[in-house]
Amino acid sequence: MSLQNTVLNLVFNARDAMPDGGLISIGAAAAVQSHAALIEFRVEDSGIGMTQETVARAFEPFFTTKGKGLGGVGLPMVKHFAEAHGGHVEIESTLGSGTIVILRLPAAPSGIDAGQNDQPAPSPTPVKTGSPPSRCSLVSDRPLTGHVW
């Protein structure tokens, strides 16, 4: 599973948690935890949320709240991806108030191109800060609900 598929999986889960529409926010930022440089990805939805009991079981293979035979492998795959890359994933959720899934992965050491041929990494492209949030279009096979995604 790639990082792209991992984040997409989280977005699909967020979408499914909003049967009447809602808002999904996706973000990425540098972070530090226990003196380690990390990249933190967040997928937040304004959906139905989960009980703490559901959160505790969410990473169990084939555990699902979507009905019999309708899933249960997405979040375990996200957890496997995170752990296989030296990271971790956590869920913050309140029933009725939405969910935030936080994926933290180790950042590549500064000046090293992820260990490939021990060549220095190219200089990073400066990132403009303070710019307004971006918007994207979403194509869905679900009927329009009048909600902003």
Image (cartoon, rainbow, N blue to C red):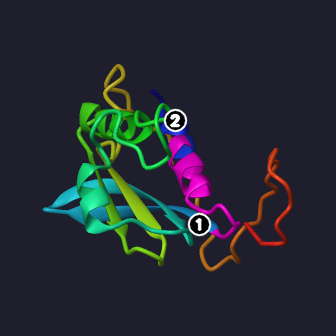
Q: In this rendering, would 128 be left or right of 146?
A: left
Image x and y of residue 139, in percent: 82, 48
Q: Is residue 63 above or below residue 100?
A: above
Image x and y of residue 12, in percent: 59, 47
The answer to whether residue 32 of the structure is visible from this angle is yes
Helix, strand or loop under label 1 = strand
Question: In 3D space, how far apart are the residues under numbered discs 2 and 1 (Cα atoms)?
Answer: 24 Å
Relative depth, front residue between 108 and 31: 31
Image x and y of residue 34, in percent: 13, 62
Q: Quadrant of the N terminus?
A: top left
Q: In this rendering, would 10 be left or right of 94?
A: right
The stretch in magenta equals: 9-23
Instruction: Quadrant for residue 82, please give it.
Output: top left
Relative depth, front residue between 38 and 68: 68
Residue type, numbered disc 1: Ser
Residue type, numbered disc 2: Leu
Q: In this rendering, would 137 be left or right of 44?
A: right
| Number of marks drawn | 2
Residue 25 disc label: 1
Q: Is residue 3 above or below residue 47?
A: above
Residue at image position (26%, 50%) is 57
Residue at image position (58%, 60%) is 126
Helix, strand or loop under label 2 = loop
**Residue most extreme to the left:** 34
Relative depth, front residue between 90 and 17: 17
Asked if marks 2 and 1 touch (Cβ < 8 Å), the reply is no
Q: In terms of sequence position, does the residue under pointer 2 or pointer 1 come before the other?
A: 1
Instruction: Quadrant for residue 47, please give it.
Output: bottom right
Residue 70 disc label: 2
